[in-house]
Amino acid sequence: MPPPVIVDTGVLYAALDRDDKHHKICADWMLSQRTKAFIVPSLVIAEVCYWLHESELSDKGESTFLAQLSREEQFQVYTPTRTELLRMSQLVLKYHGLGGTDASVVAAAEKFKTADIATIDRRHFAQIVPDHTGWFNLHPDSLVP
């Protein structure tokens, strides 16, 4: 079984919002990855819900997103433990501007021993050196920084 992919907010949001400039790339990439497990940190879910609620997609988009997460076996929800929250705290201090949600993506990658992250945020994730591997493989590959 291939290693899981940790999914960040921007990729999920772009895949749902047809008006997002990264929609086609993210939606096509996610559909092409049907054999991989997607790990979605709970903080990412909260952030996607916030963005959807504040967008033109509003309640319907947020509801559709949550229902899809509940149905799709491909998506697994990750909730950080106390130890992982401490690691997230360290990451936020070490990498200026990272933020808690992005730190939860890194913590999930370290927990599941994967180098694969789906993100639009190349600026932060390209600079992080995780504990378990040299660098992250950032997806979708065709996304231009």
Image (cartoon, grey):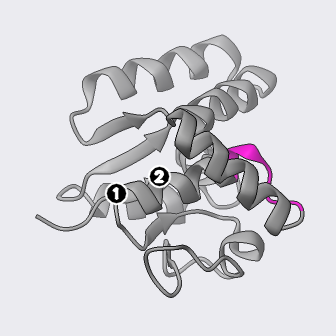
Disc on res. 91: none
Q: Is residue 1 above or below residue 128?
A: above
In this view, the residue farthest toward the bottom is 134
Q: Residue at x 65, y 25 (%)?
A: 49
| Res 40 → quadrant | top left
Which of the image's four quarters has the N terminus? bottom left
| Foreground residue among 107 and 50 | 107
Q: Is residue 3 left or right of residue 28?
A: left
- Could you give the CA–CA distance between mark 1 and mark 2, rounded to whole angstroms? 6 Å
Q: Which disc, if any, is residue 108?
A: 2
Q: Are marks 1 and 2 in contact (CB under 8 Å)?
A: yes
- Considering every residue shown, the one lying at the far right of the view is 96
Q: Which residue is mark 1?
A: 112
Q: Regarding mark 1 in the picture, which secondary structure is present there?
A: loop
Provide residue 117's location: percent of width, then percent of height.
48, 65
Assign the C terminus to one quadrant of the image.
Answer: bottom right
As displayed, is residue 13 above or below residue 51?
Answer: below
| Amino acid type of the residue that numbered disc 2 sits on in the rendered structure | Ala
The residue segment tinted magenta is 97-102
Which of the 4 quarters of the picture holds residue 70? top left
| In the image, residue 61 above or below residue 80 | above
Residue 48: give x, y in percent of width and height.
64, 34
140 or 135: nearer the eye?
Answer: 135
Q: Residue at x 65, y 12 (%)?
A: 59
Q: Nearer the viewer, residue 8 or 87?
A: 87
Other-residue count near label 2 (Cα within 10 Å), few / some / many at <14 / 14–19 / ≥20: many
Q: Badge 1 local density, few (<14 within 10 Å), some, or many (20+)?
A: some
